[in-house]
Image (cartoon, coloured by chain):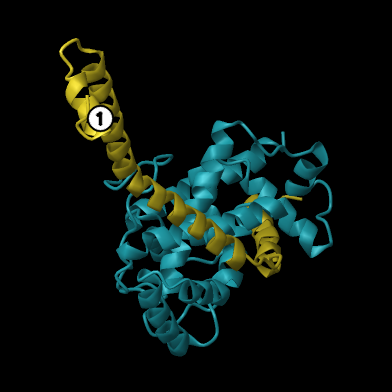
Amino acid sequence: MNEDPLARFERLAEAARRELPPVVEVRASVLRTLRTRAAARTAAEHAPWVFSLGSAVLAGVVLVAFQLASADFPYVVLAATFTGGLP
Amino acid sequence: MNRRGKPGEAFPPLAPRPANARFSTHSAPANAGTNGVAEEEADALDVTAARTGDEEAFGRLIARHQREIAGQMYRFTRDAATHEELVHDVFVEAFLSLPGYRGQAPFLWWLRKIAVRVGYRYWEQRRRSRAEITLADEEWERLRGTLPAPTAESELAELAHRALAQLAPTDRLVLTLQYLESYSMTEIAAATGWTVPGTKVRAFRARARLKKLLDRERT
């Protein structure tokens, strides 16, 4: 009854050391996780390029819209271009 | 005070293996596999291939070492689902850290250090979320010897884990590695990044706290 608590604990620890852990199989799940991460990283790497292209297209659209809205836009030249120079 | 970190702090970066560590480059630890040099050579080849993105090579590393890592992570949790999750996390973290592996120590030893970090992080998360393991009165009685200890090995082991879970994560870690993984002080220091004298002090204090905990409950 007066046994040292640490000595008693060491006996428990010895049993824990002998205990066999459950078998796990993580290869498939790890590789799946790594593939998902790689895909996400690739998407993130391409994101700036896609954003730049989108920004350029949007800027072009806005510029054309402003040009069309302005009073001195050369509608005559535009019309001539599309009608083959006919009035 | 230990220059590398105080109890409860996150671990510093993985420390190099000490020269007098039991796990030398030519002899795997007793519980680390059976084929020693051949296994280390296979690991070296697979690590090189895995660094270039060879999934199959990393898959072979997982297959070769998951049993040892599963054994180690079983010291950190006994919940089956969490256990598998922790083993999974160790290998994911290992893959992401592969560029930092310099090959100075056997791959398994490096992997075990990552496992210690993953396990410790899990304990810290549990502590922060106050998911504590409490002991029933009967379990305390068994721990302090007023009731007979369980006879089944698994129950004895469970009781050991639950007793250690009453300690702070740093104390629990040093005693888990010492008592359940049979690590020497040098190996604990290498696995945690602490200095050897600092590890000895931590182990001494952790044992004293465990003893006090068990004694205090006696009254």
User: Could you tell me residue B72's position as x and y percent?
Assistant: 57, 63
Q: Nearer the viewer, residue B41 or B152?
A: B41
Quarter of image, res B24: bottom left
Which residue is pictured at 53% across the width and 71% down the height?
B62
**Left or right: A58 with respect to B192?**
left
Q: Colour of chain B?
A: cyan
User: Could you tell me residue A86's position as x and y percent?
Assistant: 22, 29
Q: Nearer the viewer, residue B161 or A66?
A: A66
- Kindly tell me whether residue B128 is visible in this rendering: yes
Please determine whether, in this image, residue B2 is positioned above or below residue B217.
below
Disc 1 secondary structure class: helix
Residue at image mark 1: A60
Please determine whether, in this image, residue B27 is positioned above or below residue A9.
below
Q: Colour of chain A?
A: yellow
Which residue is pictured at 80% across the width and 37% down the height?
B137
Which residue is pictured at 69% across the width and 56% down the height?
A8
| Amino acid type at image mark 1 | Gly
**Quarter of the N terminus of chain B within the rendering:** top left
User: Could you tell me residue B47's position as x and y percent?
Assistant: 39, 75
